[in-house]
Image (tube, rainbow, N blue to C red):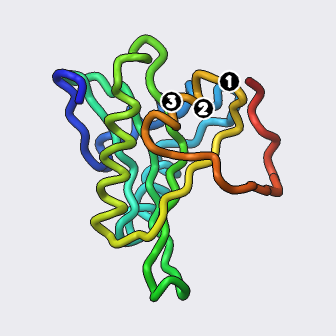
Amino acid sequence: MPNKLTIRSAGQDDLPSVLQLYGQLNPGDKTISPADGARILQKFSSYPGSAIYIGFRGDEAVSTCALVVVPNLTRGGAPYALIENVVTEARHRKRGYGKAVIAQAISAAWKHNCYKIMLLTGSKDPATLTFYGDIGFEQSKVGFQIRHIAPRKG
């Protein structure tokens, strides 16, 4: 794990840092109000096992990802997990922070007895695909989606 990186589940006090990082993920998105963000984060944290993980280098938020644990009626009732909204502050990329935050989310998913973890990316950038492959994700399924909001470009 990178030196001096502290990773924790984001709380209400971390919301400005999370939203700042998300602004780099989807720069054209409409920003949400602090009140809406607080309400959404509270709702998000009410799903057992789900969390937004945030990595700090000192006092600066440098990386985040969201883990959603989904209840399931197959696989003997074992839940599955989704990892979404992975972003590392542009100035801090290629230092292992994103991998460390995702590793924390993976560990939490296994502790919640998830039988699999899924992660989708719209990126076709070979570096991004290698990044996820190096963590242990494999491109082994075909994904489909229907979107209400247009995908980001790039």
152 lies above or below 53:
above
Contact, CB < 8 Å: mark 1 with mark 2?
Answer: yes
Q: Is residue 127 rendered to the left or right of residue 63?
A: right
Task: Indicate the quadrant containing the N terminus: top left, top right, bottom left or bottom right.
Answer: top left
Residue type pointed to by label 1: Asp
Which residue is at a point 79% across and 56% down the rendered structure image? 145
Q: Name the disc covering residue 125, or none.
A: 1
The quarter of the picture where residue 129 lies is: top right
Residue 7, x across and y down, in percent: 25, 39
Residue 25 horizontal side relative to residue 109, left or right: right
Which amino acid, mark 3? Phe
Q: Distance between the residues labelled 2 and 3?
A: 5 Å
Taking depth in this image into account, of 133 and 27 the one nearest to the observer is 133
Tags 2 and 3 touching, CB below 8 Å: yes
Q: What label does residue 129 carry, if any?
A: 2
Q: Residue 131 carries which label?
A: 3
Q: Is mark 2 on a helix, strand or loop?
A: helix
Residue 9 placement, left or right of 30: left
Q: Give coordinates of residue 120: x percent, y percent.
A: 63, 47
